[in-house]
Image (cartoon, coloured by chain):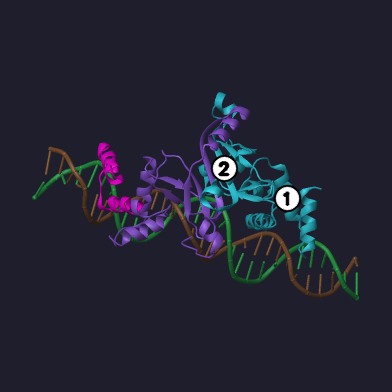
Chain colours: A cyan, B purple, C brown, D green
Amino acid sequence: MTLIQQVTERVRGEGGRMTGQRRLILEALENLSGHPTAEEIYARVRKEDAEINLSTVYRTLRWLEESGFVAPRWFEDDHRRERFDAAGSSDDHFHFRCRTCNQIIEFDDPNLEIVKQAFETQYLAEVENITLVLYGLCARCKIQPNQAQGA
Amino acid sequence: MTLIQQVTERVRGEGGRMTGQRRLILEALENLSGHPTAEEIYARVRKEDAEINLSTVYRTLRWLEESGFVAPRWFEDDHRRERFDAAGSSDDHFHFRCRTCNQIIEFDDPNLEIVKQAFETQYLAEVENITLVLYGLCARCKIQPNQAQGA
DNA sequence: CAGCTTATTGCGAATTATTTGCAAATGGCA
DNA sequence: TGCCATTTGCAAATAATTCGCAATAAGCTG
């Protein structure tokens, strides 16, 4: 089932409406690779609907976030700008961000479960959530520098 | 050697001045526990010098950051607000943040080195920096909830 | 398929953390 | 003690995101 179908089902179930704007924003989320910003999604959607407003994009993203369809992320090299992770909040994974080309790679590692448990045991705490970001150079930029993409 | 002494040495070495404002900000950094915000440092410093301006606090923190004496941190539950880690950028450690009392615990774990190396090997990347934050409930808040402190 | 209700949109203004420009103040060497 | 470049205070600028509100349009209902 596609993202648009899932969201449609959800929105209808709670008396909401599936508008043209929402459909376009969902399409943009599926098609834009990486973790786009609201502006990037806005730019993409604008190609189809020149009248759409940036605040509609923000509102829709916030609403998708509440339902767990997207998760907000912030990276330190650009900490003011929110990015949207279309993988949603359910599927947990970690991130690597290349400081040259700005690409984001998602990965997972079972060691994080160990780190979490060790912390919980030592501090008698309960860990609900983990954010891990590795910053550095991706394979390509290690060899051939300066391929900077969008911020 | 105290932080103020270290910074004085550095600033004099590069033709800068150790002003009363800078001294107070450094004292605040040493005395405030956790990872204070610029506003918190400002509030503290203001008790000694009612004339100091918030932008002086920001400028000084930025300058300390450039020299590696403090490191900026952002936590997701309050992602817009910058916090300053007096441990500096040299000493690397990770963070736990309690979602109830907002306290920050610093910790280290050798498994992160393994995660880093595994990632570098698999993706042929070079990791320069790691940010890891665990979010959850600290020991006290697990038992006795609602002791919320500053944001 | 036209009407109706109210969820959603567009727009512009507000918000908030941080930064900047500039004239006035001051640290610290001569 | 005076000089002058570095720093400060102040007020205005920035920039991402949010909000209020009147206008628009989903999608039931008849």
| Chain of the residue that carries numbered disc 1 in the rendered image | A
Q: Residue D14: x, y in percent?
A: 47, 51
Q: Nearer the viewer, mark 1 or mark 2?
A: 2
In the drawing, what numbered circle is on residue A26? Answer: 1
Query: Taking B105 as reference, is C23 left or right?
Result: left
Of residue A90 and residue A79, the one placed in the foreground of this image is: A90
**Disc 2 target residue:** A115
Amino acid type of the residue that numbered disc 1 sits on in the rendered structure: Leu
Residue at image point 32% right, 50% down: B26
Q: Residue A66: x, y in percent?
A: 67, 58
| Chain of the residue that carries numbered disc 2 in the rendered image | A
Give the vertical position of B34 relative to A118 (above or below). Answer: below
Q: Which quadrant of the view contains residue B38?
A: bottom left
Q: Is disc 1 surrounded by few (<14), some (14 to 19) or many (20+) residues within 10 Å?
A: many
Q: Which quadrant of the view contains residue B39?
A: bottom left
Can residue A26 be seen from the camera position used here?
yes
Task: Write down the region rendered in magenta.
Answer: B1-29
Question: Are dots 1 and 2 on a single chain?
Answer: yes
Tell me, yes or no, whether the highlighted magenta stretch contains residue B128: no
Q: Residue B29: x, y in percent?
A: 35, 51
Residue at image point 57% right, 42% down: A115
Q: Which image quarter is the C terminus of chain A in?
A: top right
Can residue A151 be seen from the camera position used here?
no
Q: Find numbered disc 1 in the image and state the secondary structure of the residue it sits on.
A: helix
Of residue C19 and residue A133, the one placed in the foreground of this image is: A133
Q: Find numbered disc 2 in the image and state the secondary structure of the residue it sits on.
A: helix
Q: Residue C19: x, y in percent?
A: 42, 49
